[in-house]
């Protein structure tokens, strides 16, 4: 779908969209149409329940005097509540509605009502951004779809007084949306297409945006002592990988970077601690944390972010081969700490701990944030509306929560405490990879990871197990892969580290 910006004018074809505030307060375009149509809008509104609320749309045949075939009234809701996320939702809902009715071209007249927190230019850009995000569709393997089953919308034109200014605001948002789509594709691909080597190749493709990308294979990781990560992948025919992506956009290229760490279990059978068969196909998205980090690095590079950021993702496939890691095995991590592996399905933390240590040893980050579809326990605690956040620094937690609120990728802070940490002590090694209890599973996983955070490093762990995949459509995200974390991380860097 192409998005364009133009001066306001009544289109000669397609669908025209006019905005209406709460209590049916018509915008300038709607008022103009009302006059041209000799009261047609008033009659249509009178026969409907449409009030102009933020989640409402009313479709009518274009009245006399309008060359467009169809007219849609879309609600802006209460002006005081019209912020970026509300505007994005409007754009998303519009695209979703029109893709299902066969419309090919749409023009929406953007008008910011009095009392809105957004001016017209910002409103235009944010509506376009929401439309762009919602237009995503993963359909590359569909070969027998009928034309009427495919999205029909080819062009969305945003009509605004200063189209140049709106496009200037939209361009960096469009680059973030491209990164979101890229990450959604990675998560959506099946395990026979995305595996450690092929996911590493996807990361390598970002070199053309200016990212420095290095890939370490198993021999290099073995020399570094990454026994925790390598143990997870030893039962797979696919070679494990560690991908390091660097973006140096700050004025001071030697300034210590922000480090983003991602769990990339490209398919998780559970290993010898085999998962139940029902629903195992969902485990193709157990690499959602790595996809978020790769997507965030793509967004930062594409929009030339003025910050230094390093992304490190550990990529493995967890399989139950004869060579696979056994429950009870003891491995030595890159940090030198030993781990008793009581359950091979608690593998993500083993991947992350070596990736985290590598980032700290090589890049001395001022802040380190890891993302992982780590525990089912976080789903029990928070469901599918917020990700769990664990942090060793209050200011970092507050800034991440603010970035989540700004992007709609919400975080809820969870506890860390010595009492939970003691549950991870092992009688045979420095620690074990599960507590042995069903209680506080997401907390004890975070406590495990905290043991690999070096002194003085501000660290946060985001457990996104409930957020990587959506079971139903959302205003700016269709059912399926969400790429949760891409926008959040991009916003966090933009708000706190860009020069």
Image (spheres, rainbow, N blue to C red):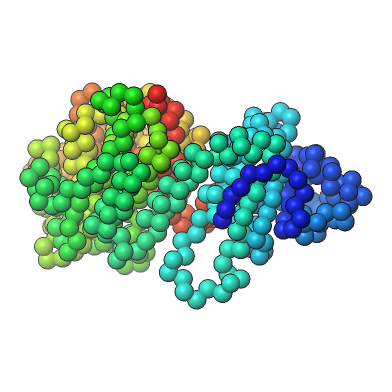
List x then y, in percent, for residue 323: 11, 62
Q: Is residue 27 above or below residue 202?
A: above
List x then y, in percent, for residue 234: 14, 58
Asked whether, in this view, residue 171 is left or right of residue 296, the answer is right
Instruction: Report the residue at 15% width, 61% height from top.
Output: 235
List x then y, in percent, for residue 352: 23, 43
In this view of the protein, which residue sits in the foreground, 285 or 209? 209
In this view of the protein, which residue sits in the foreground, 116 or 447? 116
Asked whether, in this view, residue 64 is left or right of residue 96, the answer is right
Total label count? 0
Instruction: Report the residue at 44% width, 34% height from top.
Output: 491
In this view of the protein, which residue sits in the foreground, 33 or 275? 33
In this view of the protein, which residue sits in the foreground, 471 or 342? 471
Q: Residue furthest bottom?
A: 144
Quadrant location of residue 344? bottom left
Instruction: Report the residue at 16% width, 44% height from top.
Output: 432
Asked whether, in this view, residue 119 is left or right of residue 208, the answer is right
Instruction: Report the residue at 68% width, 54% height from top.
Output: 106
Q: Is residue 374 above or below residue 112?
A: below
List x then y, in percent, for residue 374: 31, 47
Which quarter of the rendered picture does the N terminus lie within? bottom right
Quadrant location of residue 440? top left
């Amino acid at each position: 779908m192409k998005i364009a910006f133009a001066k306001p004018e009544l289109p000669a074809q397609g669908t025209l969209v006019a905005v209406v505030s709460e209590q049916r307060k018509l915008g300038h375009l709607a008022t103009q149409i009302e006059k041209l149509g000799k009261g047609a809008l008033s009659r249509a509104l009178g026969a409907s329940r449409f009030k102009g609320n933020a989640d409402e749309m009313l479709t009518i045949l274009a009245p006399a005097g309008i060359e467009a075939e169809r007219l849609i009234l879309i609600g802006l809701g209460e002006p005081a509540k019209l912020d970026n996320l509300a505007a994005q939702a409007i754009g998303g809902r519009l695209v979703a509605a029109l893709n299902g009715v066969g419309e090919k071209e749409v023009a929406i007249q953007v008008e910011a009502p009095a009392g809105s927190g957004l001016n017209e230019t910002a409103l235009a850009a944010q509506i376009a951004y929401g439309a762009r995000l919602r237009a995503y569709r993963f359909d590359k393997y569909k070969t027998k779809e009928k034309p009427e089953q495919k999205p029909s919308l080819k062009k969305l034109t945003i009509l605004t007084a200063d189209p140049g200014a709106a496009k200037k605001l939209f361009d960096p948002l469009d680059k973030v949306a491209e990164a979101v789509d890229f990450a959604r594709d990675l998560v959506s691909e099946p395990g026979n297409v995305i595996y450690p080597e092929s996911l590493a190749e996807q990361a390598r493709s970002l070199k053309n945006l200016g990212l420095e990308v290095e890939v370490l294979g198993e021999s290099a990781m073995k020399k570094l002592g990454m026994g925790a990560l390598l143990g997870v992948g030893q039962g797979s025919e696919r070679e494990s990988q560690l991908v390091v992506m660097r973006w140096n956009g700050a004025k001071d290229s030697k300034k210590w970077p922000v480090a983003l760490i991602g769990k990339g279990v490209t398919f998780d059978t559970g290993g010898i601690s085999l998962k139940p068969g029902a629903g195992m196909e969902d485990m193709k998205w157990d690499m959602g944390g790595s996809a978020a980090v790769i997507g965030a690095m793509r967004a930062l590079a594409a929009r030339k972010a003025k910050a230094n950021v390093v992304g490190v993702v550990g990529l493995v496939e967890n399989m139950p081969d004869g060579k696979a890691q056994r429950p009870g095995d003891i491995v030595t991590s890159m940090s030198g700490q030993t781990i008793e592996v009581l359950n091979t399905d608690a593998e993500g933390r083993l991947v992350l701990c070596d990736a985290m240590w590598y980032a700290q040893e090589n890049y001395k980050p001022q802040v380190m944030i890891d993302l992982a579809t780590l525990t089912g326990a976080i789903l029990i605690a928070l469901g599918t509306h917020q990700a769990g956040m664990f942090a060793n620094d209050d200011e970092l937690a507050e800034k991440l929560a603010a970035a989540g609120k700004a992007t709609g990728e919400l975080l809820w802070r969870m506890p860390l405490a010595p009492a939970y940490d003691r549950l991870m002590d092992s009688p045979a090694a420095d620690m074990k990879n599960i507590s042995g209890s069903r209680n506080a599973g997401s907390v004890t996983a975070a406590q495990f990871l905290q043991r690999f955070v070096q002194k003085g490093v501000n660290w946060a762990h985001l457990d996104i197990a409930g957020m990587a995949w959506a079971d139903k459509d959302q205003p700016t995200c269709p059912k399926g892969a969400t790429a949760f974390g891409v926008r959040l991380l991009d916003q966090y860097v933009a708000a706190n580290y860009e020069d």
